[in-house]
């Protein structure tokens, strides 16, 4: 009788040990998955009048890499916030996304408070993009990059659109593909852009296809959310 009780106790102990090992492995894998997404500080120099960070490994960490950039023009921060909000809600993405976030700490405003030409922070954001973001992307094995912007209604009927400043580039092709698969995103190339030489032009010219996304800052937030969702899904459905 004592032998049988001993065997039963021994068997229960073995089962508990195996259960503990399996539970630990499951929890460990879950923790690894949550830790795969991380934030890296790229620049935090007070002389730059701004900071740069990158949120890494969003989506499929084993997928091909795509870069997004927000914050080049601080006046357009409402659209940058919309992108970050909508991207955080996405799951089951095909690709692995890194989001480069530029935070200008001088002359920070938004549309409706200052005129578009009345904010020196615009140049600061562009310089931060060229100095810190461009080298990371061009050397980061990315399939493509998207620079997220907004405007104050300066483009007539063109409210929500994508474009590449380099005509005939692969970046233009990707932008047109996103537009053709979207209900509310058109392809429209403005005659001039100030930030092109600081990011999207050198990226296109040095092996990383890149295009802009532009949104009208004065449309309602629910429409902005809808358009941003179209952009994210359109990019995630591209084939490389």
Image (cartoon, rainbow, N blue to C red):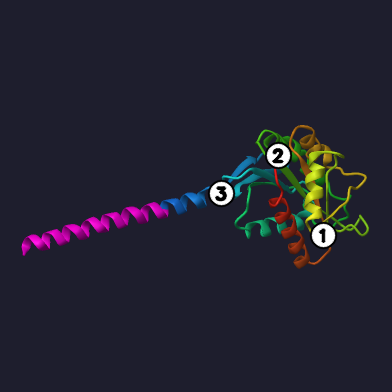
Nearer-the-camera pick, 168 or 149: 168
Q: Position of residue 118 (x, y in %)?
A: 87, 50
Considering the image in quadrants, where does the N terminus appear? Answer: bottom left
Task: Mark 3 vs mark 1: give the one in front.
Answer: 3
Report the span colored magenta. Answer: 1-27
- The residue carrying mark 1 is 217
Instruction: Report if residue 62 is visible in the image.
Output: yes
Relative side of 116 to 21, left or right? right
At x 31%, y 57%, the residue is 19
The crowding category of the residue bearing disc 3, from other C-alpha atoms within 10 Å (few below 14, some 14 to 19, many at least 20), is some
Q: Secondary structure at mark 2?
A: helix
Of pointers 1 and 2, the one earlier in the residue sequence: 2
Q: Position of residue 15 (x, y in %)?
A: 25, 58
Residue that extends furthest to the left in the rendered view of this protein: 1
Task: Tell me if residue 74 is in the magenta stretch.
Answer: no
- The residue carrying mark 2 is 133
At x 68%, y 59%, the residue is 86
Task: Determine which quarter of the picture holds residue 124.
Answer: top right
Instruction: Report if residue 124 is visible in the image.
Output: no
């Amino acid at each position: 009788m004592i032998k049988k009780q001993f065997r039963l106790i021994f068997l229960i102990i073995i089962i508990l040990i195996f259960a503990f090992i399996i539970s630990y492995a499951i929890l460990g894998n879950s923790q690894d998955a949550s830790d795969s997404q991380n934030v890296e500080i790229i620049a935090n120099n007070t002389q730059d009048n701004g900071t740069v960070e990158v949120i890494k490994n969003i989506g499929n960490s084993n997928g091909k890499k795509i870069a997004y950039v927000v914050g080049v023009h601080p006046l357009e921060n409402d659209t940058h916030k919309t992108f970050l909000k909508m991207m955080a809600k996405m799951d089951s993405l095909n690709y692995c996304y890194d989001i480069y976030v530029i935070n200008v700490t001088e002359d920070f405003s938004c549309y409706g408070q200052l005129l578009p030409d009345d904010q020196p922070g615009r140049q600061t954001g562009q310089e931060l993009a060229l100095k810190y973001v461009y080298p990371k992307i061009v050397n980061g094995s990315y399939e493509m990059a998207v620079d997220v912007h907004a405007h104050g209604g300066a483009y007539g009927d063109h409210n929500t659109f994508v474009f590449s400043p380099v005509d005939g580039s692969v970046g233009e092709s990707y932008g047109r593909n996103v537009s053709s698969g979207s209900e509310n995103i058109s392809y429209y190339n403005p005659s001039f852009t100030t930030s092109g030489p600081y990011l999207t032009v050198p990226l296109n010219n040095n092996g990383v296809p890149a295009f802009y996304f532009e949104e009208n800052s004065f449309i309602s937030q629910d429409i902005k959310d809808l358009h941003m969702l179209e952009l994210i899904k359109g990019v995630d459905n591209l084939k490389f």
